[in-house]
Image: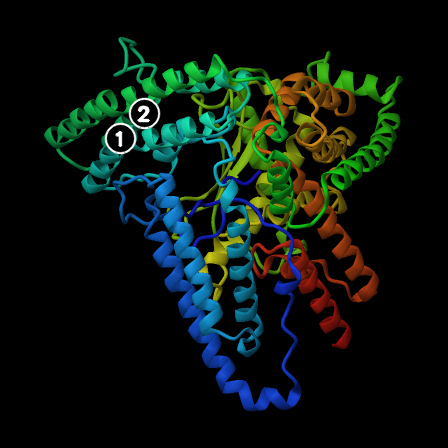
């Protein structure tokens, strides 16, 4: 999973939308190419218009970025380094109006037919993003402000720890100013959540206990109580101040100001937030699906379109999931026979899940966690050394493997990726959640490392933001089906390279990861369209996948509070695989997988329909050559 993933959230007119997109509509179809006779007479005009619109795209991007201090930090910039985003509904409404005005300006000032192919694609993608933003605007507050899986209560410390670099005194002062601003920032989010709750939009009752626990973790330890251990944020503050090249008096003054900010801003902000969670918990229901929300059916349909960039219905996605689960079960049975296991596939699942011999997980200790991180790093390093077999284009950014921080690991996902800073000041990070190492079995380790690291999210997202002559809104944008589809496809590619051959259990782990994404199609639509309960969805995963019970519970709880998001992975992977099969059939011995991968990645994130256009155009070009 790429963090927004796996993704930068711009709150502005020139920004990409928050998550993924809807299907390409007919009015977004590609403009027909200019005729041969027209080309010679309009060449100068085309070049001029293309240059102008690319300058305009950058202007819009910068204007939008100026409205999001946190996005500036994500990009490695230190402008507005002491500020948080304005997350009020009034600001979001203003941002949307600016975005629509920007769209109208583009349509008024630029003619799609006069642009070169690259600029025309940017035009279409900008229009696509703006239109889907407009379609979704009335449902902007249906996405839960807070949930056990993610939200500002956990992202505030994660942002300060991982994004806010402190290289000098001014950076430290900005860090402390952000601590001082936490009260207002979380207060805005809390007000939004209260407004949602009043309209019947809130996560299920069971999620509140986890949100409360995470919030309490953040204000546990010094200086919030008499504990001898420092809190997460004080430990980070001290680490960053201790690394500064300043005299002791200056460092102590900064530390004193920081401690005061923790006590006077951070602590009351979280205490008020916890009180809100406790109050809402008393009357929240345990209904799980999006169907419970106002106009929930329409909202879920929009979510599916947004996440998959297709027009597939919930029923179609559900049936696809059932078919894929059955197909993968057949492949799993073959591996079961290969390793000589006697019993049914469900018996084999139970054996893998319970691990009676203790060979599929590292000890649930700090030493075991360090061993996991070291082995995951080794897997990625090995793949890095073989990239020439798969790619012509490779990312410049570095990649590291890191444990999810303890304060949020109980509620965070299994694994996720955070893109690097464009200026190289921060590497890409593959986060592994090692709260319970039994939930991270070693037979899934390789596939997970390939998905989150190399050749998965790090390849796609780092290459995207390193693209030259590409507007910034495309470099840093995202379409979930494209991004997560590539991640899942990247679990499959190493099989072609023989990297699972030495260990059938590792290949079983690859299939376990794939069936997990196939089952998501079933349970996500089950929860949000067919009104399954949380318990019914958990039972489906337990019956059809080898994953441990804790894994199944955490996954379903994630899908409950993120309607539609989980459907993007398998649909995106299937599209990439089908396009590759089409290219292999059309080109035969001339098919070059490295060239195919470059075609998939060369334009950055795109909706699946546009990806299909790009691949078809490449096939035609190769055939003509």
Residue at the image point whose x is 68% and y is 57% from the top = 609
Instruction: Please tell me the numbered disc located at residue 233.
Output: 2
Say if residue 573 shows up in the picture: yes
Judge left or right: residue 348 versus residue 312.
right
Q: Are marks 2 and 1 in contact (CB under 8 Å)?
A: yes
Judge left or right: residue 519 versus residue 117.
right
Judge left or right: residue 126 versus residue 505.
left
Disc on the earlier residue, 2 or 1: 1
Return the residue nearer the eye: 311 or 506. 311
**Residue 122 percent location from the top left of the image:** 53, 65
Q: Secondary structure at mark 2?
A: helix
Instruction: Please tell me the numbered disc located at residue 179.
Output: 1
Residue at the image point whose x is 69% and y is 63% from the top = 613
Farthest residue, direction left = 249
Q: Secondary structure at mark 1?
A: helix
Residue 519 vs 406, above or below: the answer is: below
Judge left or right: residue 498 versus residue 563.
right
């Amino acid at each position: 999973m790429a963090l927004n993933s796996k993704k930068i959230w711009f709150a502005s007119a020139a920004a990409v939308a928050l998550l993924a997109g809807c299907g390409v509509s007919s009015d977004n179809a590609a403009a027909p190419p200019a005729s041969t006779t027209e080309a010679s007479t309009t060449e100068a005009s085309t070049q001029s218009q293309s240059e102008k619109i690319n300058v305009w795209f950058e202007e819009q991007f910068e204007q939008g970025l100026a409205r999001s201090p946190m996005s500036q930090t994500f990009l490695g910039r230190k402008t507005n380094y002491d500020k948080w985003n304005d997350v009020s509904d009034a600001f979001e409404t203003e941002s949307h109006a600016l975005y629509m005005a920007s769209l109208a300006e583009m349509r008024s000032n630029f003619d799609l037919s006069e642009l070169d192919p690259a600029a025309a694609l940017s035009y279409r993608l900008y229009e696509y993003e703006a239109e889907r933003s407009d379609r979704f605007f009335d449902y902007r507050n249906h996405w839960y402000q807070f949930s056990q899986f993610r939200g500002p209560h956990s992202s505030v410390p994660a942002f300060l720890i991982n994004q806010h670099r402190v290289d000098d005194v001014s950076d430290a002062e900005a860090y402390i100013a952000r601590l001082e601003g936490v009260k207002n920032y979380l207060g805005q989010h809390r007000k939004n959540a209260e407004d949602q709750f009043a309209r019947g939009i809130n996560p299920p009752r069971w999620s509140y206990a986890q949100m409360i626990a995470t919030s309490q973790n953040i204000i546990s330890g010094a200086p919030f109580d008499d504990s001898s251990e420092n809190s997460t944020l004080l430990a980070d503050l001290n680490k960053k101040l201790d690394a500064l090249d300043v005299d002791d008096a200056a460092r102590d003054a900064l530390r004193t100001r920081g401690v005061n900010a923790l006590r006077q801003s951070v602590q009351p902000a979280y205490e008020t937030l916890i009180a809100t969670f406790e109050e809402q918990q008393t009357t929240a229901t345990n209904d799980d699906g999006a169907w419970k929300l106002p106009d929930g059916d329409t909202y879920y349909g929009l979510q599916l379109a947004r996440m998959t960039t297709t027009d597939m219905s919930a029923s179609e996605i559900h049936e696809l999931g059932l078919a894929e689960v059955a197909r993968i079960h057949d492949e799993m049975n073959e591996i079961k026979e290969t390793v000589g296991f006697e019993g049914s596939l469900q018996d084999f699942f139970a054996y893998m899940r319970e691990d009676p011999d203790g060979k599929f997980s590292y000890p649930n200790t700090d030493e075991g966690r360090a061993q996991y991180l070291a082995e995951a790093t080794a897997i990625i390093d090995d793949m890095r050394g073989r990239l020439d077999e798969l790619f012509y284009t490779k990312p410049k950014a570095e990649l590291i493997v890191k444990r999810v921080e303890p304060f949020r690991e109980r509620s965070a996902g299994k694994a996720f990726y955070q893109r690097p800073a464009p200026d190289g000041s921060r590497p890409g990070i593959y986060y592994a959640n090692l709260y319970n190492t039994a939930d991270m079995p070693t037979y899934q380790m390789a596939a997970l490392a390939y998905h989150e690291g190399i050749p998965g999210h790090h390849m796609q997202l780092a290459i995207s933001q390193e693209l030259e002559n590409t507007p910034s809104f495309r470099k840093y944008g995202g379409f979930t089906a494209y991004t997560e589809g590539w991640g899942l496809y990247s679990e499959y590619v190493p099989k072609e390279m023989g990297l699972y051959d030495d260990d059938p259990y590792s290949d079983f782990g690859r299939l376990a990861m794939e069936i997990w994404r196939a089952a998501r199609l079933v349970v996500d639509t089950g929860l949000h369209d067919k009104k399954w309960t949380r318990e019914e969805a958990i039972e489906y995963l337990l019956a059809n996948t080898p994953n441990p019970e804790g894994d199944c519970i955490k996954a379903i709880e994630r899908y409950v509070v993120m309607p539609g998001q989980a459907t993007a992975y398998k649909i995106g992977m299937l599209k990439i695989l089908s396009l590759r099969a089409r290219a292999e059939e059309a080109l035969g011995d001339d098919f070059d997988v490295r060239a195919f991968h470059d075609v998939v990645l060369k334009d950055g994130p795109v909706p699946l329909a546009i990806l299909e256009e790009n691949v078809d155009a490449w096939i035609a070009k190769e055939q003509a050559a």
